[in-house]
């Protein structure tokens, strides 16, 4: 009933609006549940780019439409949505997801439907490692991020004894593994491995392990909501050594939760500072104006992901003589993109769909405020 | 191995006690409602969560007012916990009125459905309110009673490491003990307590003994929910950060604690809560040491469940529960 | 007037005509207006209407099979939403089968099980591990991944694995009763999930939290099953088998022994029913259906990880059973279908629709109240309303009605004693 | 050989000795009664025989084989069936289904037979239903076959329990106060049914009953328990006049008011 | 001037009408008995009076007050004690606690203790088993406990639903004597009995219920002599 009001023309399988062909782009991100703040930011970033480009495509005879989906951070929901998205032939691309755990199974579905996906946030190695031709991402992978953190920890912070904690999710375990491997290679000793359970608030058990092991750096693979509490409780227990984490900790929420305890914490992130470039600054200002709130670190990546996709779509339309291309064509065109200049990123995909220009940034919290100070940057 | 175990033991015991005390008081609420209606009130965890939010909200509000700086923190705490407990108590009573009372004669599992439904509703309503008021729903309250106290265990023997805790730990522990003792008195020493048991056994006959069954049930819900809400405040104070989803897991753990102790049994719930807290903390800190790294802290819940199951196999009525004698 | 209408509606033939009309209209509108979810749902609802019609059971079976196997796929096949309808229908099928399995345990045998999803997980993992290279981590012989043909064997293996898990979990049943049992099953459910989540070490069985991806799609005669409509038919077949079996159980010696144990354990024992064996059988059989659907699920998702098997999932299945009507096969089917469709389609569509309005600026909703976040609230509200409105379940369980005339036999033990009080020995 | 032979059976509950050194036997084809004051241990004795409780000491033989240590369902398979003092029907199941449950152990069908709905299964099922129906007819319950058991009147429930117990085709049936809650007329009807039942179904009967009219009319042998001990045994006529039994159990029968305190003083000493 | 009066009571269980207009009265100090076969509506009548069953039509007057559909916890406070059918002992409470429940509305430990002693004088067995769980008592012991529990309320009207069910003959005698004794102390008794003969022989008056309606009433001795009754209930 919900969409039955739309005009439809089932014989061709495409929808039209005012004589122009409708092209829909879906976003999939957690709009509800624990990470809905960032999920919202991803949707909004993508929406902003789409709105900006609408006029251009209108001239070419196409109406762009955003279809936001809520994957709830749940693989099952993501796959179920993916099937719905894949089946809707007027959808030509997906921007998403936030969680690799959702992106991996969902992309298997997109591949079946030849539907291209551009990810603004997924870092797990496996996302692009399965040889799927529709899967692309503009951010760095955990096997860049983890080692970058390890190198910084060992070389710059002089950590010799490291304690690694994970939240036992796909993301947390994935990044911690890459970190651990590199740290060992660099000569550091892993003096203990612990884990916490998502959703709990008392992490004293693992903190006591840390106390016993007395490391000189603690690495946490997980998200800010647990990370913040972990740091706070650890500091309460007198653990003063540096903490380090990955992009999952890159959120203003981390500071809200940990408060002053956040000082002496380092994070690696695949998201750069939006204000670093002129375009970025403009983006931040526009975003604020449009949505009446500050962008999250991933907003600009969603914006750029949408940009990359629309560029590919445009290329595909052009090479199809201005007519609606097939999904395969769009996927090929997106993969073929070189040196796309977004608001913050420059995108060139390699044959796996990874962005060769992706970078990892290292930040330090010197005081209890967000964003933290950038102390390093690693490219491929 | 033993050395490492002993080394962290004092701290593990303290942390386990703090967590256990919280489990115990939440478990009391479960046990009370179960005791009278044989209903697993799955929404109880959400009452606890609501209490945590109301309490934190009050703290934030009161701390924002200038005149409160003149009041000692302890007094402030008492005010907040009393107000919160009355609020959640009333929510509990309302919940019983709307969602459980109409189903008294329905099949036993139906109220379980409304309980789950109420849980979802409470989670989302609290989230709305928090998000509308503060822009986010993960809330961090003002830190109260955060002085660190260190006990010098290492001076007793070099086997032990020092243990430290915040003042809030003492407050949690003392409040929890007070609540438990008061409740224990209420249930075991007053006529109300026997009335509660009579109602739970046979409502009709209880009413023939001049017992106002509805009133007894409402009171039980009020007391149980007030306890839950009060614990929410304790929790928020001890751990600082709360979100609308803390109730589910914690509620579940508390329920397990109640079963471990013997569901329906007040002292059992307390014992179960403390044991569960200690066990969890011990497992989280030592499992990987004990198993040479094969099983890590991630198996702490498995450990806790395994103990529970073993206990139930050997004592099917829980640690302090009495076997229900059925005359054939 | 009103009476005429009722009598018209009571008449068998007018029912048939109206029903046919209904089915034709909904199918046509589904076919013509492909995105009409309403038409899709109404067509499904025709099965419910059919259930209440005054027809022979066999006729009902044939008609519903016709609708599900032919009409529904055909009517929805015409347009872009086809796969999404099939996806939803497949999920409905999976959940219905699981709920029917749980219904044996909870509804018939009266054993409250809060960890039922564990069996689903066991089934899913048993296929996923062997249909990916995962198995080569611990299997010294054989080549992995196994081909898609193995799927069919794994339907049985998955069922058996789940049944074994059911028996293992059921063993504490020997001792624990009532709500204690609930907590023990909950514990086992969580243990299984946590173990799957961590069994990447010391030997990598399950790939832990990372999950197992790229599960080989099933194939039949060299044809790969990948799209939702393929799985739709697979699910439907298994579901048909499940319903068939469950209905048989219900009114057999077995079903009666479950119910007897549920009603009164001591009396059941006195009638020679062994408690332990009867309960274990309920666990095992209930688990089997769940395990089989687990295999289908793993194949359909092509990816599984432990987050699909949480406690909440177990609760949801329990909600389906209780809401539908404990012990009632049609009730449980309706309950499961309703809850699944509500979660996967209605609430999602509703959110998408409000989202669209929001995006197009027709209405503005504050972020905190965004419809996506309302789903749980709505679901919760619906649960409460349903439960209050129909505390006995949507379609409560009915006892089998025996036909007296068929049971009367000539060599009756006693004479007609309607009017006489004492028994007259000579007449026997 | 007696169908049931109990020697020196004792059962303690904590400190309480509910059955003390009881020895008795039930002859094949007989109707035997156990009587005694409330709390004498009669029901406990039934529970011991049927495996609900295990004796603290002593031996229980059914057709010469020991049943001590067996679970209730195993005892049932040895051919012992019973009714309960506090009625235990399967309340949500229909009257006919209740009787069908009683036939459980005689149905041979396996899992496969049920799933495939084999003709043999269907036949067996139909036969069982017919037989159950015949039992219901016997107890005048046939018109109620599709009622839920819990909706039956008290008297009907008692009869249904007997019917269900008979459905197990027992060699020995234990009836625990079958006439409780019935009025004299109904009790009379029941007396006739029980009397006839023994021969009809080739079953020995052991019953507990406080209605002396019923007991005296149908029992061949009576055992009297008091405080867990057997204080007397014999034919109805012997029991009727046994002073011990009169004092402990029967009372004067026609006591007039005013003798109350004396009578109660007698029965409650020790 | 009756202490308890029922005017055309109609009571339903769902759609089933159990009472079809029952009118009767109980005089102060009387023993009144209700007889009738299984399912006639005897228990329902008592339930309607005490408030356990909801009366749809008609009124119940107790001591000049209309108590129709008052909840049980109020009617008991007014002095109407109801000993329900099937004893309904609190199985998990001890004998002592069961008795205490009977005196739930009574304040003062001494009074409770005093009443308990009175109960023990009727039923010494209860004193012996003070700390045994009610549920493990034998059937007869439970019946004693149920009556004892009601006596703890010191009611003005005692309604007994089949008190002799399951009791040894000697105890049945005692129960009937106790009923007489209680009555002689001024307690009004409303008695349901299967054993119509015994009930009628101690009752001042009796009512016969059939299918939810009263078909006959009269003094105890009248009814005992009645042929219809002899045939239907006295066998
Ligand atoms: N499970 C038990 N635990 C403790 N005591 C018990 C238990 N079962 C029975 N008793 C006690 O054992 C004694 C005998 O009880 P039993 O039920 O056998 O009596 P009975 O002869 O059947 O009496 P009645 O005629 O009143 O039914 C009673 O005093 C009773 O309280
Ligand atoms: N809870 C109930 N629900 C439905 N029907 C009931 C209920 N209780 C009693 N009835 C019905 O109401 C009618 C009157 O029952 P009631 O219990 O008053 O009979 P009674 O005269 O006390 O019989 P008995 O001698 O067996 O105790 C019966 O037909 C009975 O089936
Ligand atoms: C969960 C988030 C921190 C996102 C993370 N980079 C991922 O790919 O899963
Ligand atoms: Mg007995
Ligand atoms: Mg009655």
Image (spheres, coloured by chain):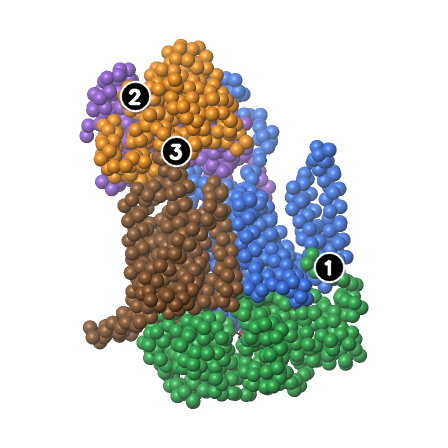
Tell me if residue A231 comes above or below residue C340 in the rendering. Answer: below
To which chain does the residue with label 2 belong? E
Which of marks 2 and 3 precedes in the sequence?
3
Instruction: Check the rendered structure and report the hue given to chain B.
Output: brown
Residue for badge 1: A5
Residue A245, given in percent of the width and then of the height, sits at 46, 78
Q: Kindly identify the residue that appears in the image at 73 percent across and 81 percent down.
A: A315
- Disc 3: which residue: E74
Neighbour tally class for label 1: few under 14, some 14-19, many 20 plus, Cα within 10 Å: few
Contact flag, marks 3 and 2 (Cβ < 8 Å):
no
Residue A42 position, x and y percent, is 59, 73
Point 40% across, 73% down: residue: A230
The colour applied to the residues of chain C in this rendering is blue
Q: For marks 3 and 1, give the one nearer the viewer.
A: 3
Res. C357 visible in picture: yes
From the viewer's perspective, is B325 left or right of C223?
Answer: left
Return the chain for callout 3.
E
Could you confirm whether marks 3 and 2 are on the same chain? yes
The kind of secondary structure element at disc 2 is loop
Q: CA distance from mark 2 to mark 1?
A: 81 Å
Q: Which mark is residue E186?
A: 2
SS at mark 1?
loop
Q: Residue at x 51, y 58 (%)?
A: B125
Q: The residue tagged with tag 3: helix, strand or loop?
A: helix
Q: Colour of chain A?
A: green
Between residues C379 and B166, which one lies in front from this camera angle?
A: B166
Q: Who is closer to the viewer here, E159 or C114?
A: E159
Chain coloured purple in this rendering? D
Local crowd size for mark 2, using a 10 Å CA cut-off: few (<14), some (14–19), many (≥20): some
Quarter of the figure with residue D127: top right
Quadrant in the picture for residue C133:
bottom right
């Amino acid at each position: 009933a919900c969409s039955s009001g739309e005009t439809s023309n089932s014989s061709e399988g495409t929808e039209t609006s005012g004589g122009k062909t409708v092209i829909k782009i879906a976003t999939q991100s957690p709009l509800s549940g624990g990470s809905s703040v960032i999920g919202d930011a991803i949707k909004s970033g993508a929406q902003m780019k789409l709105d900006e480009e609408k006029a251009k495509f209108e001239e070419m005879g196409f109406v762009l439409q955003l279809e936001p989906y809520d994957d709830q951070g749940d693989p099952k929901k993501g796959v179920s949505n993916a099937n719905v998205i894949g089946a809707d032939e007027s959808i030509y691309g997906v921007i998403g997801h936030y969680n690799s755990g959702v992106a991996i199974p969902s992309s298997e579905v997109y591949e079946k439907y030849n539907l291209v996906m551009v990810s603004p946030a997924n870092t797990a190695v496996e996302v692009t490692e399965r040889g799927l031709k529709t899967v692309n991402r503009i951010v760095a992978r955990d096997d860049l991020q983890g080692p970058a953190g390890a190198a910084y920890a060992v070389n710059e912070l002089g950590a010799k004894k490291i304690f690694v904690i994970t939240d036992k999710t796909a993301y947390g375990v994935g990044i911690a593994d890459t970190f651990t491997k590199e740290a060992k290679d660099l000569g550091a000793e892993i003096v203990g491995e612990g884990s916490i359970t998502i959703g709990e608030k008392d992490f004293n058990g693992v903190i006591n392990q840390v106390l016993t092991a007395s490391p000189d750096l603690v690495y946490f693979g997980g998200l800010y909501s647990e990370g913040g509490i972990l740091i706070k409780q650890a500091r309460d227990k007198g653990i003063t050594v540096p903490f380090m984490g990955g992009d999952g900790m890159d959120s203003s929420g981390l500071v809200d939760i940990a408060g002053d305890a956040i000082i002496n914490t380092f994070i690696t992130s695949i998201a750069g500072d939006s204000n670093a470039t002129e375009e970025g600054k403009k983006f931040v200002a526009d975003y604020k104006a449009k949505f009446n709130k500050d962008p999250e670190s991933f907003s600009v990546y969603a914006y750029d992901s949408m940009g990359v996709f629309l560029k590919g779509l445009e290329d595909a339309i052009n090479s199809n003589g201005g007519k609606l291309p097939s999904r395969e064509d769009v996927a090929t065109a997106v993969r073929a993109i070189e040196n796309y200049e977004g608001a913050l990123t420059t995108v060139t995909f390699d044959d796996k769909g990874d962005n060769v220009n992706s970078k990892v940034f290292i930040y330090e919290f010197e005081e209890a405020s967000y964003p933290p100070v950038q102390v390093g940057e690693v490219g491929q | 191995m033993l050395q490492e175990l002993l080394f962290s033991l004092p701290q593990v015991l303290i942390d386990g006690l703090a967590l256990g005390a919280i489990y115990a008081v939440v478990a009391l609420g479960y046990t009370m409602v179960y005791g009278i209606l044989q209903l697993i009130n799955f929404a109880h965890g959400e009452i606890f969560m609501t209490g945590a939010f109301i309490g934190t909200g009050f703290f934030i509000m009161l701390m924002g007012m200038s005149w409160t700086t003149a009041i000692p923190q302890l007094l402030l705490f008492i005010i907040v916990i009393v107000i919160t407990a009355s609020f959640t108590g009333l929510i509990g009573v309302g919940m019983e009125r709307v969602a459980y009372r109409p189903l008294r004669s329905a099949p036993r599992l139906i109220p379980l459905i409304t309980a789950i439904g109420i849980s979802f509703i409470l989670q989302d309503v609290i989230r709305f309110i928090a998000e509308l008021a503060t822009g986010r729903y993960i809330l961090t309250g003002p830190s109260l009673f955060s002085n660190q106290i260190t006990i010098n265990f290492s001076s007793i023997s070099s086997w032990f490491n020092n243990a430290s805790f915040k003042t809030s730990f003492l407050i949690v522990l003392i409040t929890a003990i007070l609540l438990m003792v008061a409740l224990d008195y209420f249930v075991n020493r007053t006529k109300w307590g026997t009335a509660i048991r009579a109602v739970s056994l046979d409502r009709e006959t209880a009413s023939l003994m001049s017992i106002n069954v509805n009133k007894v049930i409402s009171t039980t819900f009020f007391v149980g929910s007030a306890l839950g809400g009060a614990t929410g405040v304790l929790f928020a104070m001890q751990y600082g950060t709360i979100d609308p989803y803390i109730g589910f897991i914690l509620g579940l753990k508390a329920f397990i604690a109640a079963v471990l102790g013997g569901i329906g049994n007040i002292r059992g719930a307390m014992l179960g809560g403390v044991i569960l807290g200690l066990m969890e903390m011990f497992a989280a800190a030592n499992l990987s040491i004990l198993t040479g790294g094969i099983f890590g802290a991630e198996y702490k819940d498995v450990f806790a469940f395994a103990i529970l199951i073993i206990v139930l196999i050997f004592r099917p009525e829980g640690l302090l529960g009495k076997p229900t004698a059925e005359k054939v | 007037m009103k009476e005429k209408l009722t009598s018209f509606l009571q008449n068998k033939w007018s029912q048939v005509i109206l029903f046919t009309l209904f089915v034709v209209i909904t199918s046509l509108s589904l076919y013509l207006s492909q995105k009409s979810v309403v038409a899709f749902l109404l067509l499904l609802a025709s099965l419910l209407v059919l259930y209440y019609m005054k027809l022979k059971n066999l006729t009902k079976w044939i008609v519903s099979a016709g609708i599900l196997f032919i009409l529904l796929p055909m009517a929805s096949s015409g347009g872009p939403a086809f796969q999404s309808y099939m996806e939803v229908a497949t999920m409905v099928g999976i959940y219905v089968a699981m709920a029917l399995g749980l219904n044996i345990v909870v509804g018939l045998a009266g054993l409250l099980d809060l960890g039922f999803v564990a069996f689903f997980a066991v089934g899913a993992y048993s296929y996923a591990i062997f249909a990916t290279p995962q198995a080569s981590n611990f299997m010294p012989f054989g080549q992995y991944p196994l081909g898609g043909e193995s799927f069919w064997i794994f339907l049985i293996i998955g069922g058996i694995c789940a049944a074994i898990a059911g028996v293992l979990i059921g063993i504490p049943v020997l001792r624990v009763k009532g709500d204690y049992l609930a907590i023990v099953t909950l514990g086992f459910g969580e243990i299984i999930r946590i173990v799957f989540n961590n069994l990447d070490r010391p030997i990598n069985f399950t790939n832990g939290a990372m999950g197992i991806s790229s599960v080989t799609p099933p194939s039949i005669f060299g044809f790969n099953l990948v799209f939702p409509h393929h799985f739709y038919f697979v699910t439907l077949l298994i579901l048909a088998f499940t319903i068939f079996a469950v209905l048989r159980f219900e009114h057999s010696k077995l079903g009666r022994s479950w119910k007897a144990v549920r009603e009164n354990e001591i009396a059941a024992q006195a009638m020679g029913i062994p408690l332990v064996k009867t309960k274990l059988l309920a666990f095992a059989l209930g688990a089997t259906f769940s395990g089989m659907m687990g295999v289908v699920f793993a194949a359909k998702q092509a990816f599984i990880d432990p987050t699909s098997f949480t406690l909440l999932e177990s609760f949801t299945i329990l909600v389906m059973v209780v809401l539908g009507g404990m012990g009632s096969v049609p009730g449980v089917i309706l309950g499961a279908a309703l809850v699944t469709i509500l979660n996967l389609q209605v609430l999602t569509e509703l959110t998408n629709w409000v989202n669209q309005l929001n995006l197009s600026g027709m209405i503005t909703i504050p972020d905190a109240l965004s419809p996506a976040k309302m789903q749980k609230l709505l679901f919760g509200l619906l649960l409460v309303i349903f439960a209050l409105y129909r505390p006995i379940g949507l379609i409560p369980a009915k006892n089998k009605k025996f036909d007296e005339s068929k049971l009367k036999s000539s060599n009756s033990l006693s004479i007609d004693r309607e009017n006489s009080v004492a028994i007259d020995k000579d007449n026997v | 050989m007696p169908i049931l032979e109990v020697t020196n059976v004792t059962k303690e509950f904590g400190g309480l000795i509910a059955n003390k050194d009881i020895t008795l036997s039930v002859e094949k084809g007989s109707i035997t009664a156990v009587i005694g004051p409330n709390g004498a241990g009669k029901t406990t004795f039934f529970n011991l025989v049927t495996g609900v409780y295990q004796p603290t000491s002593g031996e229980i033989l059914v057709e010469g084989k020991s049943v001590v240590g067996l679970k209730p369902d195993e005892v049932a398979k040895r051919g012992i069936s019973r009714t309960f003092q506090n009625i235990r029907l399967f309340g949500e199941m229909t009257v006919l289904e209740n009787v069908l449950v009683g036939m459980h152990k005689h149905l041979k069908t396996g899992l496969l037979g049920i799933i495939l709905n084999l003709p043999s299964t269907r036949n067996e099922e139909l036969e069982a239903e017919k037989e159950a129906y015949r039992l219901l007819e016997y107890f005048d319950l046939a018109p109620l076959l599709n009622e839920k058991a819990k909706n039956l009147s008290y008297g009907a429930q008692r009869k249904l329990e007997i019917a269900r117990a008979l459905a197990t085709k027992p060699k020995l049936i234990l009836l625990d106060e079958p006439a409780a809650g019935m009025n004299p007329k109904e009790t009379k009807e029941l007396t006739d049914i029980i009397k006839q039942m023994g021969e009809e179904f080739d079953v020995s009967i052991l019953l507990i009953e406080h209605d002396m009219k019923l007991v005296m009319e149908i029992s061949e042998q009576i055992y009297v328990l008091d405080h867990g001990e057997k204080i007397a045994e014999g034919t109805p006529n012997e029991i009727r006049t046994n002073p011990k039994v009169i004092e402990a159990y029967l009372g004067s029968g026609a006591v007039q008011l005013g003798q109350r305190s004396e009578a109660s003083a007698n029965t409650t000493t020790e | 001037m009756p202490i308890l009066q029922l005017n055309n009571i109609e009571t339903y269980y769902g759609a089933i009408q159990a009472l079809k207009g029952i009118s009767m009265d109980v005089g102060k100090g009387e023993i009144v008995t209700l007889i009738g076969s299984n399912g006639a509506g005897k228990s329902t009548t008592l339930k309607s009076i005490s408030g356990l069953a909801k009366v749809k039509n008609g009124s119940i007057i107790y001591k000049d007050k209309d108590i129709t559909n008052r909840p049980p916890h109020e009617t008991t406070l007014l002095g109407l004690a109801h000993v329900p059918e099937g004893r309904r002992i609190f199985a998990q409470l001890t004998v002592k606690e069961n008795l205490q429940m009977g005196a739930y509305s009574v304040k003062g430990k001494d009074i409770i203790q005093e009443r308990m002693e009175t109960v023990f004088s009727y039923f010494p067995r209860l004193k012996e088993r003070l700390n045994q769980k009610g549920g493990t008592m034998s059937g007869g012991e439970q019946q004693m406990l149920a009556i004892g529990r009601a006596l703890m309320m010191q009611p003005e009207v005692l309604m007994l639903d089949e008190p002799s069910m399951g009791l040894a003959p000697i105890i049945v005698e005692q129960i009937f004597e106790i009923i007489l004794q209680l009555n002689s102390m001024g307690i009004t008794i409303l008695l349901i009995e299967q054993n119509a003969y015994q009930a009628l022989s101690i009752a001042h008056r009796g009512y016969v219920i059939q299918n939810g309606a009263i078909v006959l009433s009269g003094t105890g001795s009248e009814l005992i002599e009645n042929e219809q009754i002899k045939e239907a209930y006295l066998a």
